[in-house]
Image (cartoon, rainbow, N blue to C red):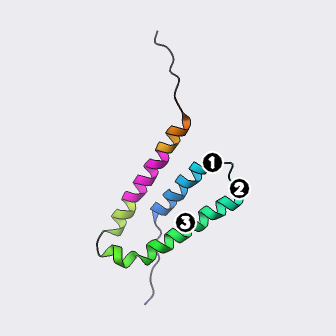
Amino acid sequence: MEETVMAFNSVTALQGLVNQSLGKADTPTVQQGISVGGLVLQGVLAASMSKLAEHVDITAFDAALTKTLEGATDLERVIAAGPVTQAPAQ
């Protein structure tokens, strides 16, 4: 019996968060590490599929985790931007 490997949006969202947190100055070695980490996470999720499927809707779980990670990415972006200077009221 052949298993189908699902692509998880949450893995992509996690990679985006890590990439943003590391900034643009990271080295190709760091980028490769991030890529390998994503592949490992994808493999772990795929291997856990049968156990997770007994307890949760995998598609809904992935969607919720994706929203959480994308929200964390947005939050990190806002924090990194620092305070906003507002023009004085006239």
Task: Identify residue type, mark 2.
Answer: Thr
**Residue at the location (46% across, 9% down)?**
90
Q: On the image, numbered disc 2 is attached to which residue?
A: 27
Q: Nearer the viewer, residue 80 or 7?
A: 80
Gap between marks 2 and 1, in whole Å? Answer: 10 Å
* Image x and y of residue 30, in percent: 66, 59
Residue 73 falls inside the magenta stretch: yes
| Range of residues picked out in magenta | 64-74
Can you say which quadrant of the picture contains the N terminus? bottom left
Question: 10 Å neighbourhood of mark 2: few (<14), some, or many (≥20)?
Answer: few
Identify the element where label 3 is drawn: helix
Q: Which residue is mark 3?
A: 38
Whether the magenta-drawn stretch holds residue 76 is answered as no
Residue beneath the point at 54% across and 33% down: 82
Residue 24 against residue 66 in the figure, above or below:
above
- Where residue 35 appears, x then y in whole percent? 60, 64
Instruction: Tell me which residue sits at (44%, 72%) in the image.
Output: 45
What amino acid is found at the position of numbered circle 3 in the picture?
A: Gly
The CA distance from mark 3 to mark 1 is 17 Å
| SS of the residue under disc 2 | loop
Q: Quadrant of residue 49?
A: bottom left
Q: Please give the label number shown on residue 23.
A: 1
